[in-house]
Each structure stands twice: as structure tokens, then as C-alpha cells.
Image (cartoon, rainbow, N blue to C red):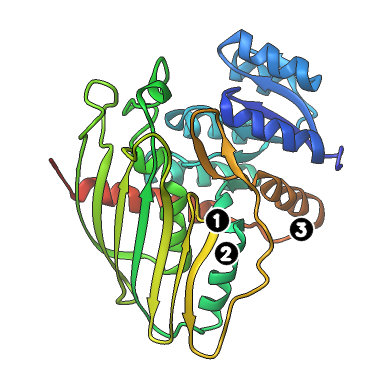
Amino acid sequence: MSASVKIGIIGCGRIAQRHAEHINNKALLVAVCDIDPGKADALAVKYNANPYYSVEDMLASETQMDVVAICSPNGLHAEHAIKALNKGYHVLCEKPMALTAVDCGEMIKAAERANRRLFAIKQNRFNPPVEAVKRILEEGRLGKVLSIQLSCFWNRNPDYYHNSWKGTLKLDGGTLYTQFSHFIDLLYWMIGDVKHVQAFMGNLAHQGIIEFEDTGVVILEFNNGAIGTINYTVNSYNKNMEGSLTIFGEKGTVKIGGQYLNELEYQQIEGYVIDDLPEGNKANNYGNYQGSMSNHDKVYDNLIEVLCNNATISTSSFEGLKTVEIIERIYRAAVKL
């Protein structure tokens, strides 16, 4: 454990429990904050941290804190991150970094002014099959990438959105932000930036429950000439079905699949075989549904290495901004059904 790194959490909901667990194993959780005193108190008692019920109180009082982990609703990420950076703390921000590229830019500027680190969480990059495919792309083993298919077929039933900020445009933002921003990040990370976008989307089964789409189909043209599709929904009956990425190259085809990009389902590569992949972590389990692979331990390993040993940051804030920028472009291009 690196007790020299002292961390506070803003937002004590479901994902904060995962953060607190890994902070407790690898650093020191000194403070937690939530506008719901019951949530803040419960997390504080569990980890012997100081509870706060306002962001301003925590940032003013915890003078020995090094890092603030932003686990609040999506629409508050920018506000909370900028306040923490302005107070001189490093920031680790949950996905999405913000709901607009403009807000992401303001967060980056705040980090630069304060000379502090701004970490963006993209834990799917640590999935073993994802790491393996990224490596062979960098080595050129697939040759020129021709096309990409991203499929995100998950379930989010009404109970998930009940009595929650989730499902609102102001604090959630949309299905691509809350459920599938990690998948959009992988497209940018592996294939590159996007040149043109077309999209169709609609709210087909969650009318009166959410304020945005539950299903979408997207066509992308990348700057490198590759074309891609994204097919996504949260209407998979009863449970998550699939989260997959298929890449067609001149010298090979690979598919990463499973429910959350956790399995190498197909490979046919000229003169090469991906083998001996380590077993990955399980998905984040929230009772009735699952999220992405739980790699927050690796996120915190990297954070500590960066702050203590000047290591390279695993996901830059600029990459976090690019994910949001691509999602914004998709939503602007969408024809609403």
C-alpha cells in the first residue's frame, strides 16, 4: 500500500464503492463526500474516512489530501473536477470526463493552471484481449484496417433508472455517455479519429423512463479511411448479451467479445496467433446488471506510479476529451426515430 497518497471521493454511489475498495488496498482514503448524508456516513465508517456533505467543505478542510476521485453524476464531473483542481488537488475522473468537449477543455485548462494531473478512467483498455489487439495493431500485424464493427447489446431495465439521476439529459446525458463511452474510447484508441458520422437512434422501450435514446445505429468514417458501425441498445431482454469489437484488416480479422469485451472470440491473422491471454477481472456487478470489466485496480496502480515514480499516464485527459467529442458528434448527426 502507498499510504503516502491520500485520496478523497466526491459522490458515494455505486461506483464509489469500487473506488473505495481499491483505494483502501493501494493508498489511503481520507475523505468522502455526498449530498446524501447517509451515503457519505456509510462509506466513511466502512473505511475510517472523514464524511462531508458539500464539496466545498471537503476541499477546504482536507489540506493533506493529494487526489480527488470524481464519482458524482456525469453532468457534475466538470464542476467538481475544476473545483478540486483549483484547490490544488490532482483529479481522477470517472467516465465520461464531462458531457461536452467544451467542459473537458475547461477541465484540462484548470489542470494546467494548477500544475496538477487530470486522470481519465478508461478501464476497458486493461482487458487482456483488448491489450493484445492494441499491441498487434501497433505492430502492424493486421495491415491496413479496412472496417470495424462495434456491438453493444446490454440491458437496463426501469429499476436501474428509478429514483435516480440516470436517465436525465442534464446529469446522465445519454446512453453513449453512461453505458458505452468506454467502447467509443476504444475506437479512438485503436483506430483513430473520426472524419464523418451518420446515425439513427430512438427511445423504443423506455418512454417516460429516460429522456434520450435506448437504441442507436451509427456509421463512421475514420481519418485513416476505415469505415465502421456501432450498433447499440439497452433493450437486450433480461440481461446483458454482448459487448464486442470486430476489426477487419488486410492481413487479419479479430473479434473481441463476451458481455463486456472480456473474450477473444475470433482471430485469423497472417503468420500470427494471439495466445496465452491472462484471465481478466470480472465485470462490475451491481446486483441486477453488470457493467464493464472491473479494472479500477489497474487504474489506481497507474495513478500511484505516475504520482510517485513519474510513470506514463495510462489515459490522458486529451483522450478523455476526444471520447466526449466523438459522442457529441454522433448525437448531433443523429436522426431521431
Cβ–Cβ under 8 Å for marks 3 and 2: no
Query: Which residue is denoted by mark 1 in the rendering?
Result: 262
Which element carries disc 1, helix, strand or loop? loop
> From the viewer's perspective, is 92 left or right of 167?
right
Looking at the image, is mark 3 or mark 2 earlier in the sequence? 2
Q: Is residue 137 visible?
A: yes
Distance from label 1 to label 3 (Cα)?
Answer: 30 Å
Distance from the alpha carbon under mark 1 to that under mark 2: 7 Å
- The residue identified by callout 2 is 129
Q: Is residue 322 visible?
A: no
Q: Is residue 217 above or below residue 256?
A: above
In the displayed structure, would residue 121 be above or below residue 318? above
The extreme top residue here reads: 37
- Residue at which label 3 appears: 310
> Residue drawn at (51%, 76%), measured in percent from left and top?
137
Placement of 129 over or under 16, stated as above or below: below
Describe the element under mark 3 as helix, strand or loop: loop
Q: Residue 327: percent from the left, percent from the top? A: 34, 49
Q: Quadrant of the N terminus?
A: top right
In primary-sequence order, the first of circles 1 and 2 is 2
Q: Amino acid at mark 1?
A: Asn
Task: Specify the quadrant of the image occupied by residue 277.
Answer: bottom right
Q: Which quadrant of the rendered structure holds the C terminus?
A: top left
Foreground of the two, 40 or 213: 213
State the image coordinates of residue 74 (x, y, percent, origin top left): 45, 32
| Inter-mark Cα distance, 3 to 2 | 27 Å
43 is higher (above) or lower (below) than 303? above
